[in-house]
Amino acid sequence: MTSRERTRRALTFSNPDRPPRHLWMLPYVSLFRNEELAALLEEYPCDIGSPAIQPPGEVDAEYQEHLRVLTHTGSYTDSWGCVWEVGEPGVVGEVKHPPLADWAALDTFQPPWNVLMKRDLSHANRFCEASDKFMMSSESARPFERIQFLRGTENVFMDLASDEPEIHKLIEMVHEYNLKDVSAWATSNVDGIFFMDDWGSNQALLIDPEMWRAIFKPLYRDYCRIIHDAGKFAFFHSDGNIASIYPDLIEVGVDAVNSQLFCMDIEELGRRHKGKITFWGEIDRQRVLPFGTPEDVGNAVRRVRSALADESGGVIAQCEWGKDNLRENIEAVFEAWL
C-alpha cells in the first residue's frame, strides 16, 4: 500500500494497513538538529508530504530573508507588510508592527495580489507526480490569524466586540484573497489543501462560539466547497480547546482536523465525533513531549488511539517536534502507533 493510498483510506474510513505518519517540526529542528531529523525520518518515513513550489536555487527573496532571521534573530516584513520580530533563533516570532493598527491605513491597503499572480505551481505539480506520498498544499487560508497580524490582536478583539464596520471590510478583503489562494491550489496536483487558524485558549474558544458561527464559519464553508469540488481533502489546524466548534467543522466539510487534543476531553471527542472526521494527531506538546519519558509518550499515544481510532481508519499518527523535545520522545510516538 503506498503512502498516498494509506492516507486516503484513513480519511475515508477504508481500512488502511496502519495509521499514516506525519511529522511536523518547528524551524529550530530543521535548522539546528538536521542530523537527528534525517535519522528519525529514515526510520519512520512520513506518509504525508508537501511539494516544493520552486526548484532548488529559486527561493524567493522574502523566504530567504525569513530564513536568515530565523537562523539568527531580528525582524523581517512579510508580503502583507506585517513586521515580525524573532527573538530566539529557530522560533517563528511575533508580529510587533501591524500595518493596520490605525484604521486610516485601510483605505489604501491592498492584499499582496502579486504573490498569487507570479506563483507558478508547475514545479509543485511535477513534485506530486513523482511521489507516492499523499501531497498536501502549504498553508493557505488563515483569516483570523491574518487579520490579527494586520490589525493587532487586542485591536481585533475590540473591533469584533464593538462590531466595527472596518473589521468586516478587512475580513472580506482577506477572504477574497484566500478564495483565490485556495482555488489555485485546487487546480494543482496536491491531494489535500491545508488551512488554519488558532482559535482556542487552554480552556475555551477565544471568542463566543455564536460569533464564530456568524462571521468565520461561512468562510471555512467556502474553502471546503472549493476543495471538495476539486476532488481533494480539506485539512484544518487550530491550537487550543476547540471542542465547541468540532460539530461545525464537520458540518462545513473538514476532512481532517489537527487540534490540541490534550486541552480537551479526548474520550468525549471520540464519543461524539469518531467516524465523522479524521483526527490528524496530535500528542501533547505542552507537557508529555517536552517533559515526559518515552513511556509517558507511549501511554499518550495509546490513549488517543483507544479514544479516537475507528476500526476502519479515522486517525493520522501526527506529532510536532519542538525545539526542546528529545528525539527519543518523538521516536516513541511513531513506535507506539505501530
Image (spheres, rainbow, N blue to C red):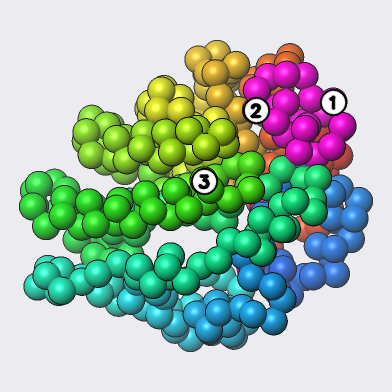
| Numbered disc in front, either 3 or 1 | 3
Residues in magenta?
1-27
Few, some or many residues within 10 Å of mark 3 (<14, 14–19, 20+): many
- Dot 2 corresponds to which residue? 11
- Dot 3 corresponds to which residue? 186
- The earlier-in-sequence mark between 2 and 3 is 2
| Amino acid at the residue labelled 2 | Leu
Residue 5 belongs to the span the image colors magenta? yes
Position in image of residue 61 (x %, y %): 53, 84
**Who is closer to the viewer here, 80 or 324?**
80
Assign a secondary structure to mark 3: helix
Are discs 2 and 1 less than 8 Å apart at CB? no
- Dot 1 corresponds to which residue? 17
Q: Is residue 291 left or right of residue 179?
A: right
**Quarter of the figure with the C terminus:** top right
Residue 203 visible (yes or no): no
Few, some or many residues within 10 Å of mark 1 (<14, 14–19, 20+): some
**Who is closer to the viewer here, 307 or 125?**
125
The residue under the point 78% across, 32% down is 6
- The earlier-in-sequence mark between 2 and 1 is 2
How far apart marks 2 and 3 lie (CA) works out to: 18 Å
How far apart marks 2 and 1 lie (CA) works out to: 13 Å
Q: Is residue 322 left or right of residue 168?
A: right
Position in image of residue 224 (x %, y %): 44, 35
